[in-house]
Image (cartoon, rainbow, N blue to C red):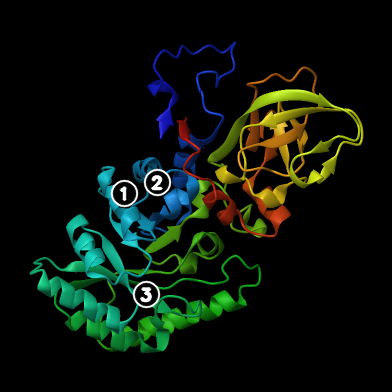
């Protein structure tokens, strides 16, 4: 991740465009101050003795995994969560020493070797997987037990052993050499729903599974159940750890939770105007002639497109900010470029900064706005920004 301070020859000058140093056509800006603020807010919000696991899978939801991981750990998070072994290795190679839970399934000898070598903590979802892990570690002559996290399926119907078989599964893992139970957890399917009925049923099943385990004389060392929405909804769901993804990045998992805690959006998406032109009434714009100018227009071409993560399905729907004013996108969004109607703003110049997501002046456009227009979720929007967009860290 780039930083302004790392660009040689840059002399700060408040009279100039603050991004004049930056030569890219488009970039993602990551506000590390906002990220740190969100983590501190979450840590203070949680129940006493509850630790925060910051979920940094999918390149930290498109924000840049290593820099985000460094910042959240420095700001008070105790754990990191990822989906895959390569994601975890990237963090270790980036110097991250905090405990890392791999939330996805791992089965192959190569994955298990990497987990042991990099001191990662896997999720065990089934007895078969547990046996494979133990046998593979035995073949490696691996000495120290690997901490493992047992996943129970309490209603998501995704990874995990059925909650009614929790006791048998835990007993099996306890008997296996080279494995040490670090936690037992599950995942909620409807925590963002204002109606808590289904979430409460999952919570009840999780409690019954834990009671079943304790009745066998086994004391689980650590329990976790809550994601962002559950963490903001009910302190009874906090247990020993909460796994928070979206809220770390300053977005709320549901509109009814926006007053639960103060968060600041971390990501802004910006690009530059690459050409400005005047087109006559009746002129078509972009592929398919989906937009015909109803009058003479001043058009700005902007150097960002669907190959960067701006959904093509936003064509003729989205807005952007330039000089603190909203302008409409016109024509089909192309692979590398899109067009804006800037007729209402005089003398737009090539090189000016356009904010597609984020703030300019008193105006703001969020990932939630895009998600609402596309009938999807903000998670998908954030994870869609491609690697050819540099991530630029700012404070």
The x, y position of residue 232, in whole percent, is 54, 59
Disc 3 residue crowd, few under 14, some 14–19, many 20+, Cα 10 Å: many
Nearer-the-camera pick, 218 or 119 = 119
The x, y position of residue 256, in whole percent, is 66, 59
Callout 1 touching callout 2 (CB < 8 Å): yes
Calculate the distance from the C-alpha at mark 1 to the C-alpha at mark 2. 8 Å
* Number of the label disc, if any, that sits on residue 90: 1
- Horizontal relation, residue 362 to residue 239: left or right: right
Which residue position holds label 3?
151
Callout 2 touching callout 3 (CB < 8 Å): no
The x, y position of residue 12, in whole percent, is 49, 13
Q: Is residue 351 above or below residue 379?
A: above
Nearer-the-camera pick, 255 or 357 = 357
Q: Secondary structure at mark 1?
A: helix
Calculate the distance from the C-alpha at mark 2 to the C-alpha at mark 3. 24 Å
The x, y position of residue 248, in whole percent, is 48, 49
- Horizontal relation, residue 3 to residue 359: left or right: left
């Amino acid at each position: 991740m780039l930083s302004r301070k790392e660009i040689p020859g840059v002399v700060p000058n408040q009279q100039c465009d603050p991004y004049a140093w930056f030569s890219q056509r488009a970039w993602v800006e990551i506000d590390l101050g906002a990220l740190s603020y969100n983590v501190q807010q979450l840590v203070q919000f949680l129940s006493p003795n509850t630790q925060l696991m910051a979920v940094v899978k999918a390149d930290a939801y498109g924000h840049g995994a290593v820099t985000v991981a460094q910042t959240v750990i420095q700001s008070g998070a105790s754990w990191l969560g990822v989906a895959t072994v390569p994601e975890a290795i990237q963090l270790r190679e980036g110097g991250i020493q905090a405990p890392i839970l791999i939330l996805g399934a791992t089965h192959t000898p190569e994955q298990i070797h990497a987990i042991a070598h990099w001191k990662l903590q896997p999720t065990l979802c089934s007895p078969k997987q547990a046996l494979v892990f133990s046998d593979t570690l035995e073949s490696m002559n691996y000495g120290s037990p690997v901490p493992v996290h047992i996943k129970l399926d309490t209603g998501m119907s995704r990874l995990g052993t059925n909650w009614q078989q929790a006791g048998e599964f835990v007993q099996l893992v306890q008997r296996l050499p080279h494995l040490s139970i670090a936690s037992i957890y599950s995942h909620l399917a409807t925590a963002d729903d204002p109606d808590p009925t289904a979430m409460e049923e999952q919570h009840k099943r999780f409690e019954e599974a834990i009671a079943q385990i304790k009745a066998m004389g086994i004391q689980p060392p650590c329990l976790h159940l809550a994601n962002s929405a559950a963490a903001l909804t009910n302190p009874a769901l906090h247990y020993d750890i909460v796994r928070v993804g979206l809220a770390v990045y300053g977005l709320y998992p549901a509109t009814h939770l926006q007053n639960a805690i103060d968060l600041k959006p971390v990501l802004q998406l910006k690009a530059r105007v690459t050409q400005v032109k005047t087109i006559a009434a009746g002129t078509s714009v972009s592929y398919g002639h989906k937009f015909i100018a109803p009058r003479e227009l001043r058009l700005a071409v902007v150097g960002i497109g669907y190959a960067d993560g701006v959904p093509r399905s936003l064509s003729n729907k989205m807005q952007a900010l330039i000089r603190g004013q909203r302008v409409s996108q016109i024509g089909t969004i192309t692979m590398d470029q899109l067009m804006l109607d800037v007729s209402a703003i005089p003398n737009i110049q090539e090189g000016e900064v356009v904010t597609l997501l984020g703030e300019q002046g008193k105006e703001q456009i969020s990932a939630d706005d895009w998600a609402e227009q596309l009938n999807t979720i903000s998670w998908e929007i954030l994870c869609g920004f491609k690697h050819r967009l540099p991530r630029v860290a700012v404070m």
